[in-house]
Image: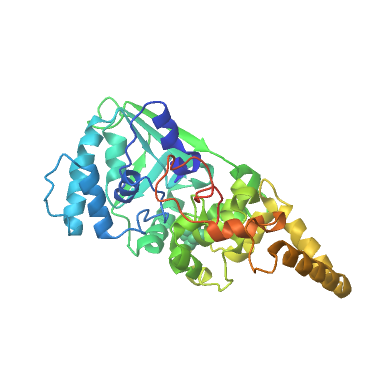
Amino acid sequence: MVAEEIGLNDHLESLGLTVVETDLGEYIIQLRHELPSHIIAPALHLVKQQVADTFREQHSQFEANRPLVEPRELTDEARTVLREKFLAADVGITGANFLIAETGQTVIVTNEGNGDLTQTLPRVHIVISSIEKAVPTLEDVSVILRILARSATGQEFSAYTTFSSGPKRSDDLDGPEEFHVVLLDNGRSAVLGTEAEETLRCIRCGACMNHCPVYGAVGGHAYGWVVPGPIGGALDPALIGLSEARHLPNASTFCGRCESVADEDPADQDHASLAGEGVRVGPDAGILPARLQAGAWAARRLRLYRLGARLAIGTLGLLGRRRGRFRQPAAGLRLDARFATCRPLRAGPSRTSGPGRCANGDGGP
Ligand code: SF4
C-alpha cells in the first residue's frame, strides 16, 4: 500500500530495475498494468478467466494449451514463476502491518507466505511503513493482530505472522545481510492533533469497504487513490487534499453500514463524520467548507437564493441553447462533467504516477 502511495514501483523501474510484486493479487494486477481495487484483495475486480488470459499472455514459457481453469492451477503457475523471482532477487521490500516501539520490531502478516520469502531470501530487506503503524508494546500488537485477521478475512489468525528484528546474526541460518526501515509520513503528522486524527487508527482491515454499498456499486478503482471505501473518503482528503480527493467525502450515503462493523473495527470510526474532518484538515483545507458556507449563507436568504437560482437557470439555458446539454461544460460545471466521465484506467503508462487514477486524470467516484 505504501509503495502504491509513493509510486515506488514506477520510480524503481525508471531507474532500470526490475520490480516484481509477490502477493498473488498484486502480481496479477501488475501483469495487467492495473491498480488494486481493494486494500486486502487487490484483484477483487477480476474473474478467473481474466486471470487465466493474463497468464497465457504473460507466461509464454509454459505450454499454450495447459489447463488454467481451477484456482489451484492458476495459483500453482504463479507460484512457479514467483519462486524463481524470490531466489534471484537482490533486494526484498515489504511493508509493515505494525511497528512495535517497545521492541523495535516490524510485523508483517500474509496468507501466502510471500512476505517471509521476500524478507529472508534476498541479501537486503527494506521495510517501508507509514508512521501510524507504530504501536507501543508487543502485548498491544498481539491484540490488534487477532482483530485484524478477524475483521479482514474472518480468520482467527493470519496464516503467516512474521516479526523482524534486524539483519541475520552470525549464527542465524537465514535472513538478510542488511535490514533497513523507512518511515513514511506523507502528510500524516499534519493530521495528528486534528479532528481527523482518528483516521490514523485504521489498521487497513478492509471491513468497512466490504460493507459499504457505494464501494459495492462503484468498486475500488473509482475512488481514485490508494485507499478506497469509507476510510478512503475520510483519510484521503486529509492526506492528499481536496484538489486530489474532492469527490471522496461525497461517496457516502450516510447509511452507516461501515459503522455496523464498528464492534469489530479497532479504529471504531464514524467514517461519515471523519470524511468531513478530513476535508477540514487536508493540505488545501478550506476550499470545500468555504463553498458550503457560501451556499448555506445564500440558502438562508430566500429572496437572494431565488434571484440567484433564476439567474443560474437563465444562464444555463443560454449556454445550453435549449438543447438540454452542453458541448463544452461551463467553468462552474467542470467538476460535474469530469465526475460523469471518470472511469478507472485498465491499462496505462503508469500505475502509480499520481493520486488521480481516472482516465481523464481526475480522481474520485
Ligand atoms: S476504518 Fe476500520 S474497518 Fe475500515 S479498513 Fe480501517 S480498521 Fe478496517
Q: Report the residue at 49% width, 53% height from top.
A: 227
Q: Is residue 260 visible?
A: yes
Point out residue 36 in the picture as x, y percentages from the top left corner. 41, 51
Task: Give the side of residue 233 with respect to residue 105, left or right.
Answer: right
Q: Residue at x 24, y 58 (%)?
A: 49
Numbered disc total: 0
- The percent position of residue 12, horizontal first and vertical second, equals 41, 31
Q: In which quarter of the image is residue 272?
A: bottom right
Q: Where is residue 203 drawn, in percent x and y?
A: 47, 54
Q: Relative to the observer, which residue lies in front, 338 or 121?
A: 338
Instruction: Name which quarter of the figure residue 311 lies in.
Output: bottom right
**Front residue of 285 and 277:** 285
Q: Which residue is drawn at 20% across and 36% down?
A: 84
Image vertical order of residue 267 relative to residue 164, above or below: below
* Left or right: 185, with 150 as reference point: right
Q: Is residue 137 above or below residue 183?
A: below
Q: In this view, does 301 lie to the left or right of 21?
A: right
Dividing the picture into quarters, in which one does residue 306 lie?
bottom right
- Near-viewer residue (39 or 321): 321
Residue 195 appearing in the image: no
Q: In this view, does 32 lie above or below 296?
A: above
Tell me where residue 124 appears, x and y as whole percent: 34, 28
The residue under the point 68% across, 51% down is: 281
Would you say 96 lies left or right of 330 here? Answer: left
Q: How is the image coloured?
A: rainbow
Nearest the eye: 52 or 267 = 52
